[in-house]
Image (cartoon, rainbow, N blue to C red):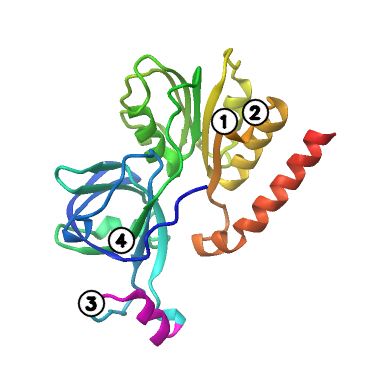
């Protein structure tokens, strides 16, 4: 189970902003709020970013409990979950990659307008997954939202470790260099006009699984994650101990809506899966 992030909000300062692709923005954070930040045990470390609603400011020192006690809910910070792309303990710098879809959402527009010196508060980190060095081979599959975690995982593969990696993005302009000491077979899937995850599921389903124990990381939009979970659990018979698999988001809802319904969604998926395994 993922660790619960610490409840102290960290005060961070933007040090660098860079566009990696037309829809991916890299933001590097520093500041005293990261003085005791620790990451590195996992490659899917995540943080909870806090964004004030338009026109709302908070007194210093920032106190999330006081804000939630004293202010109406519509003035509370909006929380968005993002993967730690890289943590540099020597420089005390935290790198986060944001998917940007124009004016939609909260975090993407913030990243697009961010500049050095801007302040961002966050909780964390949490995390649960890193590539198992004892695995015979690795499977990684995800969309843009999972790309930072996949990139971090590839950098942590043991030298020569076999890995089949499938990443679905909007088109060829969204590809980015991914480095790894492993023996990686990387497939970029271009979504085009297809539904999110459609080409990804097709590609993983078509893979001829190598012999040996696999350690799999499958994250992204909940719909295709559900399909791939059924493929791995029911059709390939993999135990949960060999899987890190979860929906980062769900088409048609924002993070608040997804998080409020995620527990029920997961329960239904598990019940369907149990019925399929029993039958």
Q: Position of residue 185 (x, y in %)?
A: 44, 18
Q: Residue at x 58, y 41 (%)?
A: 195
Evaluate whether residue 243 shows in this view: yes
Q: Determine whether, in the image, residue 168 is placed left or right of residue 31.
A: right
Residue bearing the label numbered 4: 110
Determine the image quadrant of residue 233.
Answer: top right
Q: CA distance from mark 1 to mark 3?
A: 43 Å
Residue 105 painted magenta: no
Q: Is there CB contact under 8 Å for labels 1 and 2?
A: yes
Residue bearing the label numbered 2: 238
Q: Position of residue 49 (x, y in %)?
A: 35, 60
Q: CA distance from mark 1 to mark 2?
A: 7 Å
* Residue 61, disc: 3
Q: Position of residue 87 (x, y in %)?
A: 26, 43
Disc 4 is placed on an element classified as helix
Q: CA distance from mark 3 to mark 4?
A: 22 Å
């Amino acid at each position: 189970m993922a660790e619960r992030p610490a409840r102290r909000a960290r005060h961070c300062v933007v040090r660098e902003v860079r566009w990696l692709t037309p829809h991916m923005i890299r933001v590097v954070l520093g500041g005293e709020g990261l003085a005791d930040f620790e990451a590195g045990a996992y490659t899917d470390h995540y943080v909870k970013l806090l964004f004030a609603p338009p026109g709302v400011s908070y007194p210093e020192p920032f106190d999330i409990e006081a804000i939630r006690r004293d202010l109406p809910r519509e003035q509370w910070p909006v929380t968005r979950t993002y993967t730690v792309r890289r943590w540099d303990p020597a420089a005390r710098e935290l790198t986060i990659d944001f998917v940007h879809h124009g004016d939609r959402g909260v975090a993407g527009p913030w990243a697009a307008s961010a500049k050095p010196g801007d302040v961002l508060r966050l909780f964390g980190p949490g995390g649960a997954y890193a590539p198992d060095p004892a695995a015979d081979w690795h499977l990684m599959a995800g969309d843009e939202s999972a790309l930072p975690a996949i990139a971090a995982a590839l950098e942590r593969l043991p030298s020569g470790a076999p890995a089949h990696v499938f990443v679905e993005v909007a088109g060829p302009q969204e590809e980015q260099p991914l480095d790894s000491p492993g023996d990686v077979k990387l497939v970029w899937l271009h979504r085009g006009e297809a539904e999110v995850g459609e080409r990804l599921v097709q590609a993983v389903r078509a893979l001829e699984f190598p012999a040996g124990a696999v350690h799999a990381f499958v994250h992204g939009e909940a719909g295709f994650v559900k399909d791939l979970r059924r493929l791995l659990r029911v059709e390939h018979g993999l135990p949960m101990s060999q899987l890190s698999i979860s929906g980062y988001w769900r088409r048609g809802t924002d993070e608040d809506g997804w998080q409020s319904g995620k527990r029920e969604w997961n329960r239904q998926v598990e019940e369907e899966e149990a019925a399929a395994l029993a039958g």
